[in-house]
Image (tube, rainbow, N blue to C red):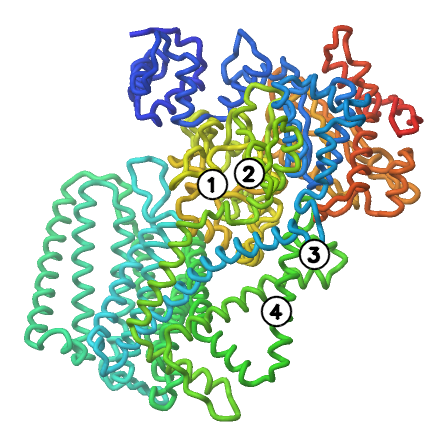
């Protein structure tokens, strides 16, 4: 067996290797702690993968391990360092930051901001190229619009065989070429497609109508899928009413099941009480050998709240069915069945306490002897409770049991249960005597305070549940007779409000019991009841809302239609459509760097309308769908006499609903559900959204510019060869980091309830994410295990490379795919800008630029898209996106960090040049502040940056400066680390620009911060932003680059950083650079 030196790897690296081998199915020895002990597992992995050769942990083995088990950020960073700054004496993972500091890397960040940011970034790139700066870049980090021009640069370098110098020469070209132009064809092509979405505009342009037709087609398919699913959802309440109506109808075929419903409700209630006691009394434990059930939130919802809801529904059905058999009092008189036997009102409290005591005992059980005794006592107690319930039923409502068994048989069953109860109780006593003879820990003894608390709990439970029982019986007496009020007293009202009323009665009873127990109840127990009650109310209100939408919106819409004149109908419909359009416009303008509505805070009325629009749209949609379902499954309505009242209209709808055929319900449900599933299977939600429309035009405009042998389709103008695979760029530099946002709108990370997103990156070598330490999902199983729990990276050439069904021309990660996702600003789920009603509105109208990609942590990471898109679309609709599903939702990188410096700080770049091209007319520096906060919170790197000069306003709104220099405090995080430098560049008019730029500013006062919604640039607008970017880039970098360049053409990064600080005034006593005097506004 091959051997190797374990000392070559650090402990964290060994732990990471162990994790990867386990994930690959080659489990090493249980206590292996050195590489030598892991060698057998490594050799086994090589054998399974068919890796030949004598090496063990060679590059091929590590790469294959990463492909199978996934890589951590440490793996990714090490691989990038090996490419960018190879070091023969590679340090272990724990020393990667030190290796990065030693390398002194340079990173360029191009921010989001649409085509405005891309055009401004082009000018900055030209200024950098003139001074040979591009060849010294190690990283290129792009977001959204910055990715447009960043992808163009990467594609140009790829077309030049990775030679950055040739691209610099192209960008800095000032001599006329063969065609007589002083501008390179790659830049000239960009000018042709400044209006990249529809190059030829106008009402009779094929480009314009292609956009409209594509949107209508894709929206129609997605809307049909969603409408079919929502209709199937609205049929579920009707199915429940159909079943309840047949149970409560005395002459119905299912009337016999009313008694079973009542008994099932009682049993479910007792089971929930047992789990409540078990949950409250159990203490959390981190040891694996002890069960944590039912402590977690999910367990409480499944094992407590759900049985309570079902008990409330079934109990209300049973009580409704037999409500007439319990005539209640008049002026304090007890029901007939209780007269002379009022002590039976104490039975519910006694039963509740017995079941509660069983749960408490099981929760406190620790030893094996206690476990046997406890389970025996619990069994005996349950049998006793059943005996009490059967005796109560025999005493008060024997006719209820006649539907199930004969009287003689019933007597034998009850007597047998009582005898069994006596035997089990005697057995429990015998085991208790034996248990007394066994030694037991002192903590297991029942102390006097516990005994007193138990007695108090018993008395309070009896008192509270007695009052609750009286209230229940009183409520039954207040119900109207079905014959007199058929509209109000029917199965619809019972199913809609029965369960919530029962839950309200239970909540009131428990509140009274907690109040009676008072100081003896612990704070922890009261908090538990508060949280459980919150979830119970959430479910109850959701239930009422769902049934209200299903049964009351359609009659309301019908009544309004019959009551008001046609002009009112038209006005209402137009108002609804206008509100919907306004909400869509507000949502689609939610680009990074703006408010959620895209409206200034001063426009309070417009902002209010924008926030109300999604709610108005949602109400209208559900009203229309409710009417559609009613017309589909219910028989024709009976006409109401004049004047039409809502009660009459609702009565007609209720009678039609109760008369619905079960076969019609089943057929309609199968049709709607089948249509939703079929479309979800066949319609790829990534291809049939705005994402592909946006991506194709983006690729044509920016990547077609550098294609040497471009062969566009003669009819459409698109060429698939414009978009290379991202993995084809893995050997070139700078290493392109394409930033997107992993949406966590439905995530559980409390600290991220504002950001609702995390960083997800695409690079030519790896794709994936890794949440910061301490995030939800991390474990205490060592550094490597924690890293794996927080995220995962996969090789780019294999990620998303497989098609789910048949051939897929979108399989594999292409440069255009990553850039388009990075610029998906208008999406239903968009990080901190997400809101539930806006999610619903934008998903319904297919305003979806984001993309569903495989989760790198899951087994399906090689699939290109979800096989059935319906479930992902529903998660998008209701804002349920998270990092735990098989597919994750990615959107604009600006929804997390619009500046693009987060990943560069993570990689410890010595110099970061941040080009902020976002719209920020008020100079609030929102994106900068957001990036600084996230770097400090997640990466613990403080950034000191003074932008007060940039924020100064002079005459005519002129700025004091267009750049600033700050410090990256790496030394406070990394031992022996070297602080870095941040050069922050922002579009600004300072008054020294060339005449054409100042003229454009006078004509367009918002320049250079026009809205990101404007993605249709003209020639003048393009040139104004490009020239401004070149001017500011020259002012910020030109002189410093010349001073820092060595004689052999190299670059001293430390000298450049010092020169930037001196020129831009961060150091005390530094002088500002000389003003620009060149006729084209170029700084010297």
Whole-Å distance between the Cαs marked 3 and 4? Answer: 26 Å
Whole-Å distance between the Cαs marked 2 and 1? Answer: 9 Å
Q: Position of residue 1029 (x, y in %)?
A: 79, 32
For mark 3, what is the residue? 203
Q: Residue at x 63, y 71 (%)?
A: 574
| Mark 1: secondary structure | loop
Q: Decide which of tag 2 and tag 3 comes sooner along the chain.
A: 3
Q: Is residue 511 visible?
A: no
Q: Position of residue 832 (x, y in %)?
A: 60, 47
Foreground mark, 2 or 4, reads 4
Rendered view: 926 above or below 815: below
The quarter of the displayed image where residue 507 is located:
bottom left
For mark 4, what is the residue? 576
For mark 1, what is the residue? 883
For mark 2, what is the residue? 758
Do the residues bearing badges 1 and 4 touch, measured as CB atoms within 8 Å?
no
Whole-Å distance between the Cαs marked 1 and 3? Answer: 43 Å
Q: Decide which of tag 1 and tag 4 comes sooner along the chain.
A: 4
Q: Position of residue 928 (x, y in %)?
A: 71, 37
In screen coordinates, is 297 left or right of 949? left
| Mark 2: secondary structure | strand
Do the residues bearing badges 2 and 1 touch, measured as CB atoms within 8 Å?
yes
Whole-Å distance between the Cαs marked 1 and 4? Answer: 36 Å
Whole-Å distance between the Cαs marked 2 and 3? Answer: 41 Å
Front-lying residue, 516 or 140: 140
Question: What number is the disc on residue 195?
Answer: none
Front-lying residue, 912 or 813: 813
């Amino acid at each position: 067996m091959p051997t190797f030196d374990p000392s070559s790897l650090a402990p964290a690296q060994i732990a990471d290797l162990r994790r990867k081998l386990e994930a690959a199915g080659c489990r090493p020895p249980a206590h292996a702690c050195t590489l030598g002990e892991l060698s057998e597992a490594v050799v086994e992995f090589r054998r399974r993968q068919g890796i030949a050769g004598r090496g063990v942990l060679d590059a091929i083995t590590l790469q294959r391990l990463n492909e199978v088990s996934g890589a951590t950020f440490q793996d990714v960073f090490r691989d990038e360092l090996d490419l960018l700054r190879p070091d023969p004496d590679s340090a272990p993972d724990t020393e990667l930051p030190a290796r990065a500091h030693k390398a002194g890397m340079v990173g360029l960040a191009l921010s989001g901001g649409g085509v405005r940011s891309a055009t401004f970034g082009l000018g900055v790139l030209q200024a950098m190229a003139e001074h040979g700066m591009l060849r010294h870049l190690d990283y290129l980090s792009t977001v959204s619009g910055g990715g447009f021009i960043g992808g163009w640069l990467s594609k140009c370098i790829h077309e030049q065989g990775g030679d950055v110098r040739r691209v610099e020469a192209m960008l800095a070209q000032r001599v006329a070429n063969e065609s007589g132009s002083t501008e390179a064809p790659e830049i000239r092509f960009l000018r042709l497609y400044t209006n990249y979405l529809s190059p030829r505009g106008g009402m009779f342009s094929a480009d314009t109508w292609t956009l409209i037709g594509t949107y209508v087609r894709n929206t129609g398919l997605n809307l049909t899928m969603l409408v079919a699913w929502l209709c199937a959802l609205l049929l579920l309440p009707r199915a429940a009413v159909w079943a309840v109506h047949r149970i409560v109808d005395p002459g119905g075929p299912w009337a016999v099941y009313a008694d079973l419903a009542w008994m099932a409700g009682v049993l479910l209630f007792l089971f929930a009480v047992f789990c409540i006691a078990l949950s409250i009394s159990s203490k959390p434990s981190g040891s694996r050998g002890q069960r944590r059930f039912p402590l977690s939130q999910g367990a409480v919802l499944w094992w407590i709240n759900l049985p309570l809801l079902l008990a409330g529904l079934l109990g209300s059905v049973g009580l409704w069915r037999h409500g007439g058999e319990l005539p209640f009092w008049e002026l304090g008189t007890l029901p007939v069945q209780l007269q002379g036997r009022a002590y039976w009102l104490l039975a519910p409290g006694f039963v509740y306490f017995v079941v509660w005591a069983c749960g408490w005992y099981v929760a406190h059980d620790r030893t094996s002897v206690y476990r046997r005794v406890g389970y025996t006592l619990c069994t005996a107690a349950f049998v006793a409770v059943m005996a009490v319930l059967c005796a109560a039923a025999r005493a008060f409502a024997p006719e209820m049991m006649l539907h199930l068994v004969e009287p003689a048989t019933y007597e034998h069953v009850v007597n047998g249960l009582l005898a069994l109860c006596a035997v089990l109780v005697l057995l429990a006593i015998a085991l208790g005597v034996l248990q007394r003879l066994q030694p037991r820990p002192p903590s297991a003894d029942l102390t006097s305070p516990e005994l007193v608390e138990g007695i108090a709990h018993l008395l309070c439970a009896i008192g509270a549940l007695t009052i609750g029982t009286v209230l229940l019986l009183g409520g039954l007496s207040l119900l109207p007779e079905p014959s007199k009020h058929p509209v109000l007293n029917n199965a619809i009202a019972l199913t809609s409000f029965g369960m919530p009323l029962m839950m309200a009665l239970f909540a009131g009873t428990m509140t009274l019991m907690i109040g009676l127990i008072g100081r003896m109840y612990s704070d922890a127990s009261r908090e538990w009841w508060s949280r459980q009650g919150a979830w119970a109310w959430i479910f109850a209100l959701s239930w009422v809302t769902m049934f209200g939408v299903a049964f009351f919106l359609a009659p309301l819409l019908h009544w309004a239609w019959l009551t008001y004149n046609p002009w009112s109908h038209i006005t209402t419909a137009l108002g609804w459509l206008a509100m919907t359009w306004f909400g869509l416009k507000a949502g689609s303008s939610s680009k990074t760097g703006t408010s959620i509505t895209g409206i200034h805070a001063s426009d309070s009325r417009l902002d209010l309308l924008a926030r109300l629009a999604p709610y108005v749209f949602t109400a209208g949609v559900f009203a229309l769908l409710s009417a559609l379902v009613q017309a589909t499954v219910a028989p024709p309505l009976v006409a109401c006499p004049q004047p039409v009242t809502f009660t009459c209209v609702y009565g007609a709808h209720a009678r039609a609903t109760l008369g619905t055929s079960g076969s019609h319900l089943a057929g309609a449900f199968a049709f709607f559900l089948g249509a939703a599933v079929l479309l979800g299977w066949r319609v790829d939600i990534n291809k049939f959204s705005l994402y592909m429309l946006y991506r194709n035009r983006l690729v044509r405009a920016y990547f077609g510019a550098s294609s040497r042998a471009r062969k566009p389709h003669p009819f459409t103008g698109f060429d698939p060869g414009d978009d290379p695979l991202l993995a084809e760029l893995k050997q070139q530099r700078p290493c392109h980091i394409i930033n997107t946002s992993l949406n966590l709108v439905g995530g559980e990370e409390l600290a991220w309830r504002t950001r609702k997103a995390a960083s997800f990156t695409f690079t030519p070598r790896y794709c994936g994410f890794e949440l910061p330490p301490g995030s939800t999902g991390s474990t205490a199983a060592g550094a490597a295990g924690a890293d794996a729990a927080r995220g995962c990276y996969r090789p780019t050439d294999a990620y998303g490379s497989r098609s789910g069904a048949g051939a897929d021309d979108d399989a594999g990660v292409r440069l255009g795919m990553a850039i388009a996702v990075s610029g998906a600003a208008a999406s239903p789920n968009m990080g901190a800008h997400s809101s539930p009603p806006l999610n619903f509105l934008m998903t319904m109208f297919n305003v979806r630029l984001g993309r569903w990609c495989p989760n790198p942590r899951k087994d399906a990471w090689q699939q290109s898209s979800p096989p059935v898109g319906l479930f992902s679309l529903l998660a998008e609709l209701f804002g349920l996106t998270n990092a735990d599903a098989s597919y994750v939702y990615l959107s604009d990188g600006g929804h997390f960090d619009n500046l693009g410096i987060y990943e560069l700080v993570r990689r410890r770049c010595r110099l970061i040049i941040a080009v902020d091209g976002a719209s920020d007319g008020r100079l609030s520096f929102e994106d900068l502040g957001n990036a600084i906060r996230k770097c400090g919170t997640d990466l613990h790197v403080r950034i000191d940056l003074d932008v007060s000069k940039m924020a100064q306003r002079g005459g005519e709104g002129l700025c004091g400066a267009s750049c600033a220099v700050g410090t990256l405090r790496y030394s406070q995080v990394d031992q022996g680390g070297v602080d870095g430098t941040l050069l922050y560049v922002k579009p600004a008019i300072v008054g020294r620009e060339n005449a054409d730029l100042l003229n454009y500013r006078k004509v367009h006062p918002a320049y250079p911060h026009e809205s990101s919604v404007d993605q249709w640039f003209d020639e003048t607008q393009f040139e104004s932003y490009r020239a401004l970017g070149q001017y500011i880039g020259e002012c910020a970098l030109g002189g410093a680059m010349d001073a820092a360049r060595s004689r052999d053409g190299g670059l001293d990064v430390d000298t450049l950083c010092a020169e930037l600080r001196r020129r831009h005034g961060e150091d005390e006593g530094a002088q500002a650079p000389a003003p620009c005097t060149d006729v084209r506004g170029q700084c010297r």
